[in-house]
């Protein structure tokens, strides 16, 4: 169970594809400008990434690498068709139209085209599923949180609920403003992560010294 938790935390924390790797910033910065948009993006990403990578795993390794990557992109594009319909059904046509070209961008992101080849296909199926869920959760948490924060500071609401802060920052509704929000979050996230690593390293060093002292006394 501990190993599974560690693998889950790879995509959720250590290799978060938005805050740590930065390979899926564009859709978040551009379209996660409200809570609803963040939810819609997360919903679409979950379905596209999960089913695309699961199907891509079935592609024979004997096929040339370059061809395999092209096949991965084609698979993701096909998966996007029913996902697009589901997003429209769940969130409405206006929401889907607002997401625009960023839905296709989700289908050709490096998590599918690169990580499938370098990570997921190399794992046993049960481990791959845990790791994949971690990466998906990492994107979704950031996407929804960015949409939530921008909804509060731009519109003074969270979905249908009013949150009156007494001020608004309309600039962060733009793509450039979204990049700033994601950049600030990434900086804080990495600072906290590095700080936690330092604290853990100090604890391990302290424990190592304690064990050495115990062995010296025992001798």
Image (tube, grey):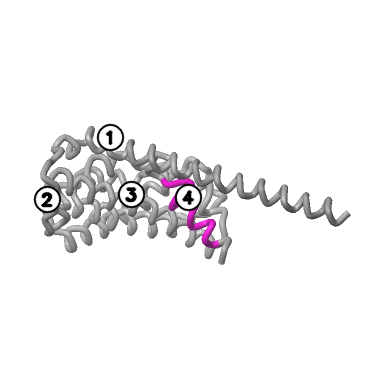
For disc 1, the marked residue is 180
**Residues at discs 3 and 2 in contact (Cβ within 8 Å):** no
Residue 102 appears in the figure: yes
Q: CA distance from mark 1 to mark 4?
A: 29 Å
Q: CA distance from mark 2 to mark 1?
A: 22 Å
The region drawn magenta spans 4-16
Secondary element under disc 2, as helix, strand or loop, is loop
The mark found on residue 164 in the picture is 2
Q: Residue at x 14, y 43 (%)?
A: 154
For disc 3, the marked residue is 142
| Picture layout, residue 21 above or below residue 163 | above
- Observer-side mark, 2 or 1, equals 2
Q: CA distance from mark 4 to mark 2?
A: 44 Å
> Quick one: label 2 or label 1, which is nearer the N terminus?
2
Q: Residue at x 36, y 49 (%)?
A: 74
Secondary element under disc 3, as helix, strand or loop, is helix
């Amino acid at each position: 169970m501990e190993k599974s938790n560690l693998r889950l935390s790879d995509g959720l924390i250590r290799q978060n594809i938005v805050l740590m790797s930065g390979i899926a910033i564009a859709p978040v910065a551009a379209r996660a400008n409200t809570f609803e948009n963040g939810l819609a993006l997360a919903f679409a990403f979950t379905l596209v990434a999960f089913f695309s990578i699961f199907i891509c795993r079935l592609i024979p390794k004997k096929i040339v690498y370059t061809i395999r990557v092209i096949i991965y992109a084609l698979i993701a594009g096909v998966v996007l068709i029913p996902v697009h319909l589901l997003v429209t059904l769940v969130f409405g046509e206006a929401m889907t139209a607002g997401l625009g070209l960023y839905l296709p961008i989700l289908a050709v992101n490096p998590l599918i085209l690169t990580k499938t080849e370098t990570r997921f296909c190399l794992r046993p199926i049960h481990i791959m599923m845990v790791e994949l869920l971690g990466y998906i959760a990492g994107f979704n948490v950031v996407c929804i949180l960015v949409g939530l924060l921008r909804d509060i500071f731009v519109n003074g609401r969270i979905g249908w609920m009013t949150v009156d802060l007494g001020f608004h920052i309309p600039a962060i509704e733009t793509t450039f403003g979204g990049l700033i929000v994601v950049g600030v979050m990434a900086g804080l996230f990495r600072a906290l992560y590095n700080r936690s690593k330092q604290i853990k390293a100090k604890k391990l060093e302290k424990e190592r010294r304690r064990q050495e002292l115990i062995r010296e006394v025992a001798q």
